[in-house]
Image (spheres, rainbow, N blue to C red):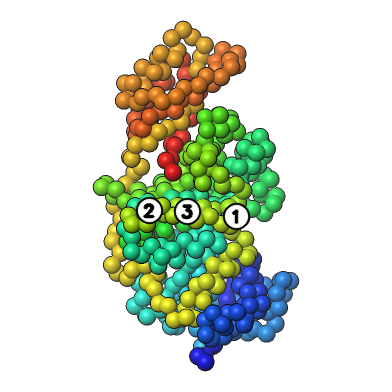
Amino acid sequence: MPEPLRLGIAGLGTVGVGVVKIVQNHAELLRLRTGREIAITAVSARDRTKNRDADISGYAWETDPVALAGRKDIDVFVEVMGGANGPAKAATEAAIAAGKDVVTANKALLAHHGQALAEAAETAGRVIRFEAAVAGGIPVVKALTEGLAGNRLKRVMGVMNGTCNYILTRMENAGLPYEAVFEEARQLGYLEADPSLDVDGIDAGHKLSLLASIAFGTKVSFDAVELEGIGHVSIEDIRRAADMGYRIKLLGVAQMTGRGLEQRMSPCLVPAESPLGQLQGGTNMVVLEGDSVGQIVMRGPGAGQGPTASAVMSDVIEIARGSRIATFGQPALSLVDAIPAKAAAPAPYYLRMELLDKPGALAKVAAVLGDAGISIDRMRQYGHADISAPVLIVTHKTTRDAIDLAIRGFAATGVVEGQTVAIRIEEV
């Protein structure tokens, strides 16, 4: 039988402890599925005295993850610390320099430094695997690099942050405003230490940039992702969207166009009866569209100890089996610079505005839309509140530039009060 595959685990938080549990509880199953033993040799974390729900007494301890990465008695460096820079980056670089393979759950690290790390690893004959960095327990990285490798990808789309999906579905189901559900999520421990990573779309944008690199053969370009968070989504918009047959999701979309690579993470309306519209709570969903396979929908838990540790172990198992795949599905040196493209592809839009109760008000709004080249698909007006009434409009396909032009035009009509809300409707 081959020699054991020896792991060094950097980070003993929720995910790291989950990995320890799988290795300890499923040792025989792992041996049968890989043909060799998988063993933990050493671990590293900031606090050795912390009470953890796993027995780590049998493993060597390193306070410094860089020291762990260089140990001669590990073959695979498992990085589950997090952070785009600092110890995670230093230790990952040290592991590659020391001839170790790397398994990481760190989307921020790869979104910012993935190209350099991939080139270093492949030059050294090492692999970096990161299934756990995107969509928790959903095996989307493996699907792109292996299962759909014979396809030319057309579009990657999905809900990739469970916290945002929890907030939006909780707002709808409980009729609560954003601020109340945000605080509830914070109390439940669903939010990152820096909540902006979740609610501003940064975390999900990291994930989208990694999937786009694999799908379209481009260097990771997180800085080119158009980011818009969910902080401005009101309970009013959620209710009105539901009345029109839609739900609001923080949706990531990446597609290659004639203008370049379009990457956006923003609130969108999706049909309530679509798979994405039916997605509840902290669940993630990724939709992949290939020229040969058509559309694939993958749904599952996007976070948590078990699902994320499961994804880490799927990468460890592939290394134990001898699988050697380039980090982003093809040699890092063959990846091309992505030409960033703004979201110019036409789509329907949802518009909500407060219309003053004045003669000809609707006609003035329709005229502004017409002047911007926008036609109306549906319109709905609700009961008056004092001197104004909310009006909803669903447009036919148009561009964001045309929508912005119309919104500027509304200000000159004298009949639209406050700021018009505009949200893209994504066809799924």
Residue 297's tag is 3
Residue at the image point whose x is 45% and y is 24% from the top: 378
How many numbered tags mark residues here?
Answer: 3
Residue at mark 1 to residue at mark 3: CA–CA distance? 27 Å
Residue at mark 2 to residue at mark 3: CA–CA distance? 10 Å
**First in sequence: mark 1 or mark 3?**
1
Of residues 345 and 57, which is closer to you in this image?
345
Residue 144: quadrant of the picture: bottom left
Could you tell me residue 141's position as x and y percent?
45, 63
Instruction: Find numbered disc 3 in the image and state the secondary structure of the residue it sits on.
Output: strand
Instruction: Classify the position of the C terminus by image quarter.
Output: top left
User: Amino acid under label 1?
Assistant: Glu
Of badges 1 and 2, nearer the viewer stands 2
Decide if residue 136 is on the left or right side of residue 371: right
Residue marked by disc 1: 192
User: Amino acid under label 2?
Assistant: Gly
Of residues 22 and 78, which is closer to you in this image?
22
**Disc 3 crowd, CA 10 A, few/some/many (<14, 14-19, 20+):** some
Q: Is residue 61 above or below residue 410?
A: below
Residue 225 visible, this angle: no
